[in-house]
Amino acid sequence: MTTAIYPGRFDPVTLGHLDIIRRASQLFDRLVVSVFEAPEASTLFNNQERQDLIKEVTKDLKGVEVASFSGLVVDYAKATGAQTIVRGLRMNTDFEYEFEMALMNRKLSPDIDVVCLMTSLEYLYVRASLLKEVARLGGELSGLAPSNVIAALKQRYGN
């Protein structure tokens, strides 16, 4: 059985994230969407809320699990039995960052590989921080996030 993790803050999950999750779930028998336990002061949604939002939109995807983690991603990958870390790439700046992280992870754990999936064109500009800014200012969110996330953002920002 091939296992991969897809780590991130997912604050909140976007349609770009969901695109990567769907595609990665077709490549691996088991995909663990791994929500990083960031300090709550640095996130809009707490860890459990972020997990719940992802669980709702991935409930029909075979082999997809949602969990949280802290610490080094390679240590977490080993603990889950994952052989692969999945990452999404949008722009060349993503590539530079992910390349550097992949090399560090390879140094820390040579038996864990990194697979990068290019984002689909329609999500090239979508990132969680930009989504939150649009939501905070009352902008249109359709086509950027799943409906449950849009509802949660509207409730959080009171619009």
Image (cartoon, grey):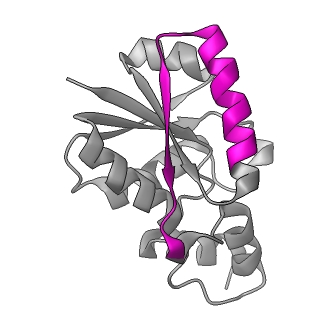
- At a point 54% along the width and 10% down the height, the residue shown is 110
Residue 139: x and y, percent? 69, 89
| Residue 134 seen in the figure | yes
Quadrant of the drawing holding the N terminus: top left
Nearer-the-camera pick, 144 or 111: 111
Nearer-the-camera pick, 112 or 11: 112
Residue 115: x and y, percent? 47, 37
**Residue 138 vertical position relative to residue 91 in the rendered view, above or below:** below
In magenta, the rendered stretch is 95-121
- At a point 58% along the width and 23% down the height, the residue shown is 73
Counting the numbered discs, the total is 0
Nearer-the-camera pick, 131 or 116: 116
Residue 99: x and y, percent? 68, 35
Quadrant of the drawing holding the C terminus: bottom right
User: Would you identify the image quadrant in which residue 144 lies?
Assistant: bottom right
In the picture, measured across the screen, residue 35 lies left or right of residue 138, that is left
- At a point 69% along the width and 78% down the height, the residue shown is 135
User: Would you identify the image quadrant in which residue 104 lies?
Assistant: top right
Residue 35: x and y, percent? 54, 39
In the picture, measured across the screen, residue 57 lies left or right of residue 151, that is left
- At a point 51% along the width and 61% down the height, the residue shown is 119
**Residue 128 vertical position relative to residue 75 in the rendered view, above or below:** below
Q: Is residue 108 magenta?
A: yes
| Residue 71 seen in the figure | no
